[in-house]
Amino acid sequence: MDLSADLGFLRLKNPVIAASGTFGYGPEFEPFINLEKLGGFVVKGLYFDPRPGNPPPRLVETPSGLINAIGLQGIGVRAFAEKILPRLRDLDTAVIANVCGADDEEYVAVAEFLSREKGLAALELNISCPNIRKEGACPAFSPDATRRLVARVKAATPLPLITKLSPNVTDIASVALAAEDGGTDAVSLINTLLAMAIDVETRRPKLANVYGGLSGPAVRPVALRMVHQAASRLRVPVIGMGGIMTGRDAVEFIIAGARAVQVGTANFVDPAAAVRIAAEIESFCRERNIPRAADLVGTLRSS
């Protein structure tokens, strides 16, 4: 059984990547899983300097998901390079850094800094987090801003660039095409859906940030639709994510056109979820005599 996933610029041993923001910097999960059983993982978002994130409360459970407003709390690129990355360099899996910025210049500075470090397989450009600015505004709302920022960061790094897109747009394909025009090597989608929750006793928002990002099974049908729309239009690979909890969920995304998938909220429910999901994809293929998981990519039938 061949579970490998070929992104063109990177070959993964299996198509399952642990998603940024749900997997710490990687070592936090070593007590639970062998990190080398993953296709890869994306570390927590990195600004240039340390960032405290939003004030609490920052998490709310919903009937079928989770709303977070963490605000990209992080240690900054210097601490990551000095304290974390040396522990990751020798791992036999793809380590991907999630690049954040308050403006274009910070995005470029973070990408340049990380590109000088050894041990990273790619950068994921986070232009879609809804928890930073009021009303969830982010560069991924605009095709023009997406194209401009992708082009600037792509010019600043020799590493492959994956651009993470927002579901909080009307036409995901236009933004994905703008990222491709800007030079991205792949896109990943979706990030979380802008959401809120209210305490009816106090009549106050449950999140200090008022709005947060909804993830988990509730968003999966939306994510699946957007992955299919993007994959149908792009030449570059699509990495799908959004509420994947099982191997069958992951297979849905692959059939829709995703070359690989990211697993996020499931990591909070089961720290071994990403490894389990890879095994379940393998079982799915074996039971149906499908020799390569990649044979499923984009095989959605129209009738």
Image (tube, rainbow, N blue to C red):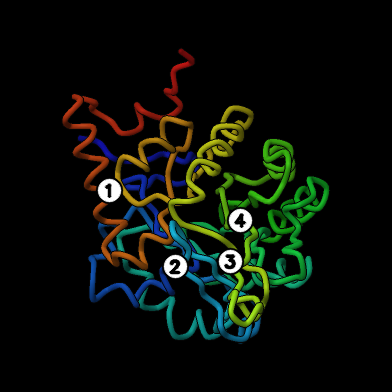
Q: Residue at x 59, y 68 (%)?
A: 197
Q: Earlier in the sequence, mark 1 or mark 2?
A: 2
Three-letter code for the amino acid on which mark 1 is drawn: Ala
State the SS at label 1.
Answer: helix
**Percent coordinates x, y for residue 76 in the rendering:** 59, 81
Instruction: Name the element at disc 4.
Output: strand
Q: Are marks 2 and 3 in contact (CB under 8 Å)?
A: no
Nearer-N-terminus badge (2/4): 2
Question: How far across and down, in percent of the image, does residue 158 sit?
Answer: 61, 56
Residue 278's tag is: 1
Residue holding disc 2: 22
Q: Tell me the quarter of the image containing the C terminus.
A: top left
**Amino acid type, mark 3:** Ser
Dot 2 or dot 3: first in sequence order is: 2
Looking at the image, residue 102 sits to the left or right of residue 190; the answer is right
Q: Position of residue 184 (x, y in %)?
A: 65, 46
Label placed on residue 115: 3
- Which residue carries the number 4 mark? 193
Nearer the observer, disc 4 or disc 1?
Answer: 4
Query: Is 147 drawn above or below residue 27 in the view shown?
Result: above
What residue type is disc 2 on?
A: Thr
Q: Between marks 1 and 3, how big is the CA–CA gap?
A: 29 Å
Q: How many marks?
A: 4
Q: Dot 2: what SS?
A: loop
